[in-house]
Amino acid sequence: VQLQASGGGLVQPGGSLRLSCSASGRIYSINDMAWYRQAPGRQRDLVAHITSSGDTNYANSVKGRFTISRDNAVNTASLQMNSLKPEDTAVYYCYADVKSDPYTRSLEFWGQGTQVTVSS
């Protein structure tokens, strides 16, 4: 299973970006999907999480500004980021909990990370 993240870049404060994560490979089902971020010198923190049924939760710092969504038909998750702030600058990582067949337990996978820089 591979996770391909895309959509990062440089944006001015107050701007918007949309990150996408596409899962491919041997996939029977995907449980949870999420976006994490890691700023230089800091630990990797959860940004937003979505279950297979669409329930979501967010870090307090992004509530009301970020929206996570997923399309189970094509094994993708997206993160719409609005009203971006300089403190949102980080490498953003996609996460998925994937079952490759109905008989074995799920495994966790990570994307390669995409840089988001918020600066004027």
Image (cartoon, rainbow, N blue to C red):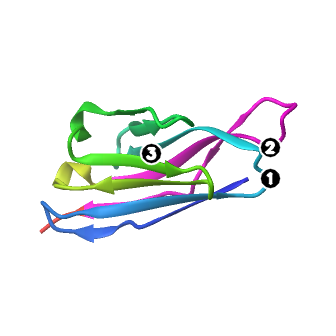
Please report contact status of discs 2 and 3: CB closer than 8 Å, yes or no: no
The extreme right residue here reads: 103
Q: Is residue 61 left or right of residue 91?
A: left
Q: Nearer the viewer, residue 37 or 104?
A: 104
Element on which disc 1 rests: loop
Circle 2 is placed at which residue position?
A: 100
Element on which disc 3 rests: strand
Question: Is residue 97 something one can see in this rendering?
Answer: yes
Mark closer to the chain start, 3 or 1? 1
Circle 3 is placed at which residue position?
A: 35
Residue 103 image position (x, y, % from top left): 87, 31
Q: Amino acid at mark 3?
A: Trp
Mark closer to the chain start, 1 or 2? 1
Q: How far, Cα to Cα, is label 2 from label 3?
A: 21 Å
Mark 2 closeness class: few <14, some 14–19, many ≥20 residues within 10 Å:
some
Residue 53 image position (x, y, % from top left): 53, 35
The secondary structure that dominates the magenta segment is strand
- Residue bounds of the magenta highlight: 90-117
Q: Is residue 4 magenta?
A: no
Mark 1 closeness class: few <14, some 14–19, many ≥20 residues within 10 Å:
few
Q: Amino acid at mark 1?
A: Arg
Q: Residue at x 25, y 41 (%)?
A: 62
Mark 3 closeness class: few <14, some 14–19, many ≥20 residues within 10 Å:
many
Mark closer to the chain start, 2 or 3? 3
Q: Residue at x 21, y 47 (%)?
A: 65
Circle 1 is placed at which residue position?
A: 26
Number of marks: 3
Disc assigned to residue 12:
none
Q: Amino acid at mark 2?
A: Ser
